[in-house]
Image: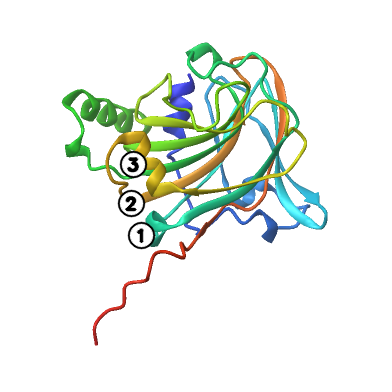
Amino acid sequence: MKLVWLLGLFLLCTVVSALDFSAYRLTESVADRYRILSIPSIKTNQFSFANDSGTTVLKIASKQSASSVAIPITSAATSMALLSWRWKVSNVVASANIRRKDGEDFAARVYVFFDVPLESLSFIERNKIRLARMMSGTDVPTAAICYVWDNQAAIETIVPSTFTDRVRMIVLQSGAQKANTWVSQSRDVAADFQRAFGHAAPAITGVAVGSDTDQSGENVTTWFGDVRFNARLDVQPTVAAP
């Protein structure tokens, strides 16, 4: 069922440039502003806007449940940008295990989706993607990075998802030492893709945030600040000749 979720995350809607949670009022519905991606037969997380010292953030209550908030990305400039966000968790998923299907739960996840050319994949991988697209009725991306807040794996661990090797997990936070504390992250997405997949990053097609506790049956509350692409200072913009 988790694989269905990973594929369902790619069903994206209204085009926006970032997850600008701070732009909304606390009384607004998250579902009215973003696509809520849920898993058939699995309880959906509870999403709401919350106040954090005067700034609106996303709050996710995951209670033996799993789902996410996602957007598409259409700007080619994001492939050479830094992805930045801040996140906070109430606790880690104590019984999770990043290397087991029955333990692949995380207090927080940030997905970045990529458009790897289908013809560059192996015959088996191409057929898996085609089958997933046929079953879901959507243009399932061919690769994804998933940044996670794990319970025990070493920071910077990179492993394939236990559900599909087209998703590579990268551990950014581990353990409960920083629970209930805002942690800021900034990642060179292209460099991370190169490390995870062994070749240059293609175009980015979307971003999603969420948490999941359906495998473990545990509970966690997660908060996300704005998720944004920021220009890298070491990359000069291309200017067309007059």
Q: Give the number of the disc on residue 203.
A: 2
Q: Residues within 10 Å of mark 1 (few under 14, many from 20)?
A: few
The residue at 76%/56% (across/down) is 55
Note whether 232 is above or below 138 in the view shown.
below
Of tags 3 and 2, the one toward the viewer is 3
Disc 3 to disc 2, how far (Cα)? 13 Å
- In which image quadrant can residue 149 be found? top right
Note whether 138 is above or below 72 in the view shown.
above
The amino acid on which the numbered mark 1 sits, given as a three-letter code, is Ala
Q: Which mark sits nearer the N-terminus, 3 or 2? A: 3
The amino acid on which the numbered mark 2 sits, given as a three-letter code, is Ala
Disc 1 to disc 3, how far (Cα)? 17 Å
The amino acid on which the numbered mark 3 sits, given as a three-letter code, is Gln
- For the residue pair 9 and 226, the one nearer the viewer reads as 226
Residue 103 drawn at (x, y percent): 55, 14
The residue at 66%/42% (across/down) is 87
Q: Residues within 10 Å of mark 2 (few under 14, many from 20)?
A: many
Determine if residue 148 is in view.
yes
Label 3: which secondary element: helix
Quarter of the image with the C terminus is bottom left
For mark 1, what is the residue? 76
Q: Which mark sits nearer the N-terminus, 1 or 2? A: 1
Disc 1 to disc 2, how far (Cα)? 6 Å
For mark 3, what is the residue? 194
Q: Contact (CB < 8 A) between labels 3 and 2?
A: no
- In which image quadrant can residue 25 be found? bottom right
Residue 35 drawn at (x, y percent): 55, 45
Chosen colour scheme: rainbow
Note whether 241 is above or below 166 in the view shown.
below
